[in-house]
Amino acid sequence: MKSIVKSLLCVGLFAWNVQMQAKVNIIPKPSQVEELSGRFLLKNGMSIGISDESLAPAATYLQELLSKSTGFSIKTGGKAGKIQLNLVSPDEADESYILETGKKGVVISAHSYRGIINGIATLRQLLPPEIECDTKVQDVEWTVPAVRIQDRPNFHWRGLMLDPVRHFYSVEETKRLLDDMALYKLNKFHWHLTDDQAYRIEIKAYPALTSMGAWHPFNGLDRGCLERAGKENNAAFLIPRKYIREVDGQELYGGFYTQDEIREVVAYAAVRGIDVIPELDMPGHNSVACQCYTFLSCTNNGISPLCLGRETTLEFAQKVYKEVFQLFPYEYVSIGGDEVDRGRWAQCADCQQRIKQEGLKDVSELQAWFTKEMEKFFNANGRRILGWDEILEGGLSKTATVHWWRGDHTDVTQRATQMGNEVVLCPFTFCYFDYSQDNGTLRHIYDGDIVPTDLSAEQLKLIKGMQANIWGEWIPTVERMHWQVFPRALALAEKAWTPRADQQWEDFLPRLESHLPRLEARGIKYRPLQTNRP
Ligand code: ACM
Ligand code: ZN
């Protein structure tokens, strides 16, 4: 049914309905909106002007966005245009923007490239939802209501984490999610590229990680998804055939990103103002690496975690990350560090020797020693280290940033910020978008205190922001991903952008409802607000 609705929307039959509800309904809610009289009409042949050459990628991005659905030819390359992008008093760290629209045109002014991109997201939302269609839509009046919007984010870190390990998503599917993120001003894409089941990133120094480690016969998780597909009569749980290949008569499922493909995704994200934060999880969640290179595990038999007693493990970790640093130009890189089976180190002579030699108390301190060694290496390469909240155990350097994920460990943020560490919030109690939903989930997220309420003003300064995590175990297809992620990603976007005092469910809900046709136009198969399916 949804695909029929989508196709009707994209052939313009919903235009009347949309015109009726034309109103300023921006998500996340902007700081200040002044509704003026009049409107701007997009026309064939119009141009996008830029005040500074550094905005050229933003102009091209906007041109592509607008011309797909309108079918208009839109010019770029000049200093002045009907849509004008202006960089004023440049300041990279300032993401604010001012958007002014009226009969004569549109002006977006900002202090940074990202500010301009945020203004473009708002402009997209002022246009009819059909602007999001991939193909030309007839009979739509492409108007923008006259407004003056002044806007800035509350948090700098507004993210989504995607796990393409348990199930693979192609470069094109990943780019599509980046476009969805940009529409809602989500600016950090945390890419969880390795885990027990597979390595998804090409590492030239260790080619077996992907030649062997990116492919496997169906495992328990895959069979579980197939069972659910049957039991729930839901094709969104079927494993896509496009990710299965036959080798020596055996079907292998998987895929990986070449370094060129990684660069392509990073560049695509950059145009949309999104940083890509890679995570190659260490020292736990490494079964596949330990199977490909058996010297990595304490028992030489492919069982995770990495053996921290051996120099060859540190050499491996550093060589891998050296390649990662070349691919991802951003300050933050995640080491992971979650759910390590540290008990294995207690049985390993090499690990015990390391503990003795470094004067460590126990296996928790052994993990902390590894994280600190890696942090020195990250810092020497101009990077800052991030890790899941287990990196607090056994001691943490002040300059590491913590992802608070264990929602039942309610003291993590308090403890980390007391020590002076920065925190990104993603407690599973609100931010695990792979968890199943009921009709109360959206409101639970929107009304929830994702930012703990027991922090001092000084501690609050260390909260970088928040993100949602999309773990892939039960998400073998983009269709299932859409169901899990939308529309709750819009609630998360507002939690991260708009100050807490301005978050009101009664105000958010109708705005959200007005966005559903926009999601449909993007081909997003979101979970309806009321349904008996989880
Ligand atoms: C996690 O969910 N294991 C970070
Ligand atoms: Zn060991």
Image (spheres, rainbow, N blue to C red):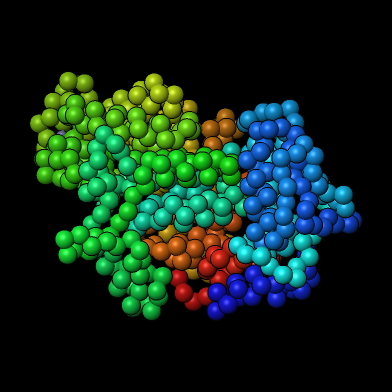
Look at 52% across and 68% down and name the residue there.
525
Look at 44% across and 65% down and name the residue there.
480
Q: Can you say which quadrant of the picture contains the C terminus?
A: bottom left
Q: Position of residue 10 (x, y in %)?
A: 64, 70
Q: On the rendered structure, is 224 left or right of 449?
A: left
Q: Can you say which quadrant of the picture contains the N terminus?
A: bottom right
Q: Is residue 53 above or below residue 178?
A: above
Look at 89% across and 57% down and name the residue there.
38
Q: Position of residue 526 (x, y in %)?
A: 53, 66
**Can residue 318 be seen?**
yes
Between 65 and 489, the one lying in front of the other is 65
**Can residue 440 be seen?**
no
Between 227 and 248, the one lying in front of the other is 248
Q: Quadrant of residue 56?
A: top right
Between 510 and 84, the one lying in front of the other is 84
Q: Position of residue 228 (x, y in %)?
A: 33, 73
Q: On the rendered structure, is 191 left or right of 364?
A: right
Q: Quadrant of residue 135?
A: bottom right
Look at 70% across and 76% down and name the residue there.
13
Q: Position of residue 23 (x, y in %)?
A: 78, 62
